[in-house]
């Protein structure tokens, strides 16, 4: 938990640093290289290492003062058929898993690309291991298969940040030049071929890099409200990014400017709470991931609350509720269960594991009340709670009466919730937390072929241009494949590796 908060603070500080004004005198800086990678996150660093180990001279441009992007916060990568799974006696079929992924996306995804990714997922882990990244295979939640390969610590770094820092060291060993605080602005494109990229450094100098090829790895567009409104079915006023990482779709837009075709627009959402005094990934936030009574803006139940065990489905359900919010309601007994007795039922990855006790919950409610946050409230009666969350007290009382009875009957007559997850609301104090959907990652982007070469509207390769990681489109249907745990992170490393190797080969042709 402490580590998560540190990571979030680090993200905020780096964002502020990146936005500081530039006063120095500007002049052009010109470079020449085999491969230029835009973005030093998981996919970009994998691409840089892969290109360098295949003999290419590589420059990486990174917008922020540090590398890693959202990969710093990620934990595990998807893979099947690995040594870790074999050692654990797990015999998971690639074929069955692939079919499940395709069915989940209603076959509206890139079947060939996904087949390739699933088939080669074990080789991907082996490649990362060869480069010094270490893994353990675990389940993401009790319902999932153990395909989530958790990154083990490297130096003082954990999970995604461990992979980032290991790959940064490999980059250094292989002579990859990384230019921080140097966002790429546009591709150099002549006669139908991408020949490099232009950026701006921290002093305001124009940076021109002429290169054999460009690999776009800018991590999607979760922080770009205009793109969310323009391309996805989501409303950016109702679904905001959970981290202020400045991932504004720069790479996707640069690729589209030179004719790149896009598909698969969407967002990977999860439940959250926000407002004055609320700590990201703190106890109030984590409570929204736990089963208990949920009501909509009318004070009525609208969903089987045990959906919390799949955060992407929960994000969808909350987004679909009237005005895209819900109230989580619980009494003192449930408060005590999560805060003191049993701890939480649903973990947030391994960052906040199952069983963690919400020992700061009382303080966070009080701090949030002091800060005037209307989204986390306490009351001595149901009527008082109803007034605070602005729902009809009669409706709320009726909802609670019915909900409590489902525990007694051992049957949820409304939504078939397993009675195990019904947390009766009986004795005060009573608590309510407003739940909103937040975006983890954007879905969708540029279409690519099997080598991650960008495609145009006629499915023709755009010469010299590769796209990887969260800038690639066509991997998901309308919802992220959470059951294939670690798909986004796994694909980031996989696509980077494939693109880097091909770009290096092109440089030596
Ligand atoms: C809290 C959290 C937990 C997660 N956990 C998991 C998990 O366990 N498993 C999983 O599969 N996925 C997880 N994800 C998603 C996962 O992090 C991403 O899918 C994946 O790591 C993204 O890799 P990427 O290289 O595409 O983007 P990033 O790692 O975000 O890298 C993009 C980089 O590009 C840089 N950039 C942007 N624009 C420019 C520009 N114009 N010029 C230069 N640089 C630029 C950014 O600053 C950033 O460094 C998680 C995400 C979050 C936020």
Image (cartoon, rainbow, N blue to C red):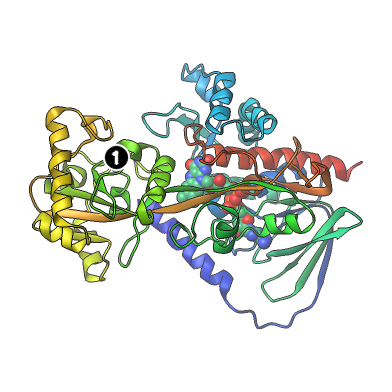
Q: Considering the numbered disc 1 on the image, is that residue within a helix, a strand or a loop?
A: helix
Q: Nearer the viewer, residue 269 or 119?
A: 269
Q: Is residue 153 visible?
A: no
Is 25 placed above or below 329 here?
below
Q: Is residue 255 visible?
A: yes
Residue drawn at x 75%, y 38% is: 449
Compared across the picture, whether 143 is left or right of 496 comes to left
Which residue lies under the disc numbered 1? 305
Residue 281 x/y as whole percent: 36, 53
Compared across the picture, whether 226 is left or right of 139 comes to right
Please tell me in which quadrant of the rendered image residue 453 appears: top right
Compared across the picture, whether 440 is left or right of 390 comes to right
Residue 184 x/y as whole percent: 71, 63
Is 222 placed above or below 475 here?
below
Residue drawn at x 70%, y 39% is: 497
Is 390 placed above or below 438 here?
below
Compared across the picture, whether 346 is left or right of 420 comes to right
Residue 413 x/y as whole percent: 22, 32
Is 245 placed above or below 334 here?
below
Q: For label 1, count other residues whose C-alpha is less than 10 Å away and answer few (under 14), some (14-19) or many (20+).
A: many
Please tell me in which quadrant of the rendered image residue 417 appears: top left
Residue drawn at x 66%, y 34% is: 110
């Amino acid at each position: 938990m402490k580590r998560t908060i540190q990571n979030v603070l680090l993200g905020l500080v780096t964002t502020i640093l990146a936005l500081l004004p530039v006063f120095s005198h500007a002049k052009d800086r010109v470079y020449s290289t085999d491969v230029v990678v835009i973005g030093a996150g998981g996919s970009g660093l994998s691409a840089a290492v892969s290109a360098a180990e295949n003999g290419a001279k590589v420059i990486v441009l990174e917008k922020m003062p540090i590398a890693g992007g959202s990969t710093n916060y990620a934990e595990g990568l998807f893979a099947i058929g690995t040594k870790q799974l074999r050692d654990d006696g797990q015999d998971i079929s690639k074929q069955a898993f692939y079919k499940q992924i395709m069915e989940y996306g209603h076959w509206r995804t890139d079947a060939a690309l996904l087949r390739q990714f699933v088939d080669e997922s074990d080789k991907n882990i082996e490649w990362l291991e060869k480069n010094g990244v270490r893994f353990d295979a675990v389940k993401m939640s009790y319902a999932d298969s153990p395909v989530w390969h958790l990154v083990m610590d490297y130096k003082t770094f954990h999970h995604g940040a461990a992979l980032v820092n290991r790959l940064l060291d490999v980059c250094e060993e292989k002579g990859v030049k990384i230019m921080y605080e140097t966002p790429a602005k546009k591709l150099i494109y002549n006669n139908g071929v991408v020949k490099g990229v232009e950026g701006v450094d921290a002093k305001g100098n124009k940076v021109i890099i002429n290169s054999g090829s460009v690999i776009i790895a800018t991590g999607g567009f979760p922080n770009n409200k205009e793109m969310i409104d323009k391309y996805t079915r989501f409303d950016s006023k109702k679904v905001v990014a959970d981290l202020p990482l400045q991932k504004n779709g720069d790479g996707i837009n640069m690729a589209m400017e030179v004719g790149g075709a896009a598909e698969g627009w969407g967002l990977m959402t999860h439940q959250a709470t926000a407002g004055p005094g609320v700590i990201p990934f703190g106890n109030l936030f984590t409570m929204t991931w736990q089963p208990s009574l949920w009501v909509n803006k009318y004070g009525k139940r609208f969903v089987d609350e045990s959906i919390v065990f799949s955060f992407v489905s929960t994000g969808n359900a909350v987004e679909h509720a009237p005005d895209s919010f819900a109230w989580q309601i619980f009494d003192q007994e449930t408060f005590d269960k999560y805060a003191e007795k049993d701890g939480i039922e649903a973990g947030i990855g391994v960052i906040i594991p199952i069983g963690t006790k919400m020992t700061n919950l009382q303080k966070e409610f009080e701090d949030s009340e002091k800060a005037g946050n209307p989204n986390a409230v306490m009351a001595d009666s149901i009527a008082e709670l109803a007034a605070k969350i602005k729902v009809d007290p009669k409706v709320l009382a009726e909802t609670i009466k019915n909900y409590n009875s489902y525990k007694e009957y051992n049957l949820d007559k409304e939504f078939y919730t397993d009675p195990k997850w019904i947390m009766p609301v009986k004795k005060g104090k009573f608590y309510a937390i407003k739940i909103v959907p937040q975006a983890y990652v954007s879905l969708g982007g540029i279409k690519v072929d099997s080598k991650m070469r960008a495609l145009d509207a006629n499915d023709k390769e755009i010469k010299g241009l590769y796209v990887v990681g969260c800038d690639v489109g066509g991997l998901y249907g309308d919802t992220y494949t959470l059951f294939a745990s670690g798909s986004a992170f796994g694909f980031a490393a996989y696509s980077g590796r494939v693109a880097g190797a091909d770009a290096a080969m092109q440089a030596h042709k």
